[in-house]
Amino acid sequence: MYSYKTKGTCASRIDFEIDDQRKVRSVKFIGGCSGNTQGVAKLVEGMDLDEVVARLEGIRCGMKPTSCPDQLAKALKECE
């Protein structure tokens, strides 16, 4: 289990697992917009780590330079 402290988002932390085949598992955002973060977590479940990073990296939230999905991408990149 990995735990990533987010920066610049409403969510304060993201917990997740990476399995032996580099698939993303058990994503849970702590804080943030509940519906959106639950949706992102369900959508990436079972996806390849590199695919999740490619799809989510660089997404912004309004005028913020980052977002919860972008922070997940950053967290996953740290696991590589």
Image (spheres, rainbow, N blue to C red):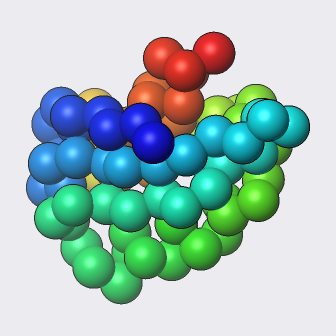
Please state which of residues 30 and 70 is positioned toward the viewer in this rendering. 30
Q: Position of residue 34 (x, y in %)?
A: 27, 79
Above or below for 38 versus 1: below
Quadrant placement of the C terminus: top right
Residue at horizontal 36 percent and vertical 84 percent from the top: 35
Above or below for 7 versus 67: above
Please state which of residues 61 and 74 is positioned toward the viewer in this rendering. 74
Residue 59 visible (yes or no): no
Residue at horizontal 21 percent and vertical 34 percent from the top: 5
Residue 51 as seen in the image, left or right of residue 36: right
Q: Which quarter of the figure has residue 18? A: top right
* Number of disc labels: 0
Above or below for 67 versus 37: above
Residue 8 visible (yes or no): yes
Q: Residue furthest right?
A: 21
Quadrant placement of the N terminus: top left
Q: Position of residue 38 (x, y in %)?
A: 43, 76
Q: Which quarter of the figure has residue 72? A: top left
Q: Position of residue 43 (x, y in %)?
A: 65, 69
Residue at horizontal 47 percent and vertical 49 percent from the top: 16
Residue at horizontal 62 percent and vertical 56 percent from the top: 25
Q: Position of residue 57 (x, y in %)?
A: 55, 34
Residue 74 as seen in the image, left or right of residue 52: left
